[in-house]
Amino acid sequence: DIINAPVHRPVCVETTAMGASYLAGLAVGFWEGKEDVIRNWEIDRKFTPAMDEETRAKELKYWKQAVNATLGWAK
């Protein structure tokens, strides 16, 4: 909700491994092209932002404050 963007969750949530395998398959000719890869992509669920703008602005402000508070922790 905070970034106000829809999210499509795939059936296979191991997207890093899947992406690597798709790229490897494309490199060795297992897949003929990206259209083959796209045909294998299945969406499990779609999430649509529903947060009102005032709440979103407030939550984003708090998130930014939290991020800024942690910036020096790794030093």
Image: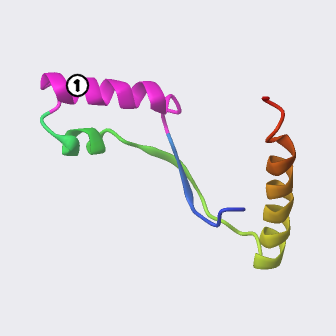
Between 45 and 1, the one nearer to me in the picture = 1
Residue depicted at 78% across the width and 29% down the height: 74
Residue 7 is covered by the magenta coloring: no
Magenta: main secondary structure equals helix
Question: Can the viewer see residue 61?
Answer: yes
Question: Can the viewer see residue 1?
Answer: no
Q: Amino acid at mark 1?
A: Gly
The span picked out in magenta is 11-31
Q: How many marks?
A: 1
Q: Quadrant of residue 35?
A: top left
Is 25 positioned to the left or the right of 59 in the image? left
Residue at the spot of label 1: 25
Residue depicted at 17% across the width and 31% down the height: 31
Is 24 positioned to the left or the right of 48 in the image? left
Residue depicted at 29% across the width and 45% down the height: 38
Residue 37 position within the rendered picture, expressed as x and y whole percent measured from the top left = 27, 39
Is 29 positioned to the left or the right of 67 in the image? left
Residue 70 position within the rendered picture, expressed as x and y whole percent measured from the top left = 83, 41
Tag 1: Cα neighbours inside 10 Å, few (<14), some, or many (≥20)?
some
Q: Quadrant of residue 57?
A: bottom right
Q: Quadrant of residue 1?
A: bottom right
